[in-house]
Amino acid sequence: MEPVLMDVASTPQVYLCPITGEVMVDPVVCDDGHTYEKAAIQNWFNQDQFADTDPISPNTGAPLLSRRLVRNHALRKIIDEWRE
């Protein structure tokens, strides 16, 4: 499923990826406790600047101790229901 562009003014902010600004399709929780679109945070991790070091949080700028991502099933369900 592709990210869906919707009227941002009427979209709850929690549904928007902090990196892309788009409604999330596959939300995941990162080590910083924030939720991102999976593809967006993976692209963030794969930047050349993080090749030899731990990445930093795109939200807080703090170092991330892990690149582990956990699916945010609850938010995904809420977003899916909101879209209908």
Image (cartoon, rainbow, N blue to C red):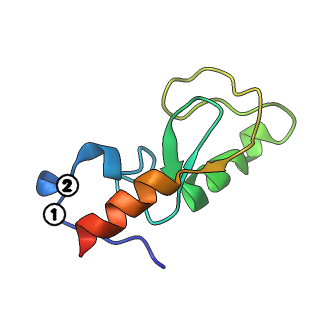
Residue lying farthest to the right in this orientation: 52
The residue type indicated by label 2 comes to Thr
The residue type indicated by label 1 comes to Asp
Q: Which residue is mark 1?
A: 7
Q: Secondary structure at mark 2?
A: loop
Q: Is residue 58 shown left or right of residue 6?
A: right
Q: Secondary structure at mark 1?
A: loop
Q: Give the spatial CA distance, label 2 vs label 1.
A: 6 Å
Residue lying farthest to the bottom in this orientation: 1
Residue drawn at x 19%, y 55% is 11
**Residue 19 sits above or below residue 64 on the image:** below
Q: Which residue is mark 2?
A: 11
Q: Is residue 23 visible?
A: no
Contact (Cβ within 8 Å) of mark 2 with mark 1: yes
* Occupied quadrant, residue 43: bottom right
Residue drawn at x 24%, y 65% is 82
Neighbours of disc 2 within 10 Å: few (<14), some (14-19), many (20+): some
Residue drawn at x 45%, y 77% is 2
Disc sitting over residue 15 in the figure:
none
Residue drawn at x 26%, y 71% is 83
**Residue 67 sits above or below residue 17 on the image:** above
Q: Nearer the viewer, residue 4 or 79?
A: 79
Residue 46 image position (x, y, % from top left): 73, 51
